[in-house]
Image: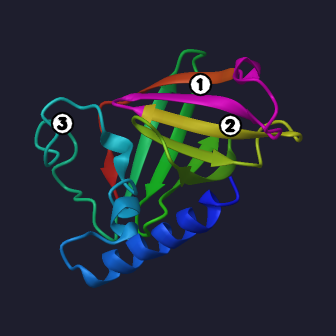
Amino acid sequence: MKALLPLLITSTLFLSACERGNPDVPAANEAVTSTAQPRHEGHEGHEGHEGHEGHQNHGHDSTDITAVTYDCDNGESIQVQYDNRTEAGAAILTINDKTYSLYQVISASGARYASENGIQADEGIQWLTKGKEGVLTNLILDHTAPPEDTTVLFRCEEQSEETPQ
């Protein structure tokens, strides 16, 4: 194992040096950029927002803030402002006149936003969207907690109209 470690480090450095000099290889930040605005994934015919009503007026550019209201199963609404002006992406959720600022995190499908400051003092929250659906869950601030300890707080559906800002 000790003999493999120097070989692994050397090959990693070699490969990273090769990528810097090759203009045909995208930079690492480009991969992150491509996930900075994934919140609309899952709509059919969604190559340029043409297949999804309400997206004609907002291309995902550096000034993109989109306000969306979600109606939830429990009768409440969640207002969300998606801020895609930076590569990181963010969402501001308003629930019962209380505001939560969430940052975008990697998601296998759809979009995922999280915050360590949640509805409960000792828990964070995460907002998951795919297509027109949004789910708000608690976020247990313990990496050893099993996934089944996560509780769905709100299960929501996007209202039919969006308001670009």
Residue indicated by mark 3: 52
Residue 81: give x, y in percent of width and height.
48, 52
Q: Is residue 100 left or right of residue 71?
A: right
Residue 78: give x, y in percent of width and height.
55, 35
The crowd level at tag 3 (other Cα within 10 Å; few <14, some 14-19, many 20+) is some
Can you tell which mark lies on residue 133? none
Q: Amino acid at mark 1?
A: Glu
Going from N to C along the chain, the mark reached first, 3 or 2, is 3
Range covered by the magenta-colored residues: 130-151
Q: Secondary structure at mark 3?
A: loop
Q: Secondary structure at mark 1?
A: loop
The residues bearing labels 1 and 2 have C-alpha atoms spaced at a distance of: 8 Å
Residue indicated by mark 1: 76
Residue indicated by mark 2: 96
- Identify whether 103 is placed above or below 40: below
Q: Quadrant of residue 141?
A: top right
Q: Secondary structure at mark 2?
A: loop
Residue drawn at the location 50% of the way across and 45% of the way down: 80
User: Is label 1 in contact with label 2 (beta carbons under 8 Å)?
Assistant: yes
Q: Is residue 127 magenta?
A: no
Residue drawn at the location 40% of the way across and 34% of the way down: 109
The crowd level at tag 2 (other Cα within 10 Å; few <14, some 14-19, many 20+) is few
Going from N to C along the chain, the mark reached first, 1 or 2, is 1
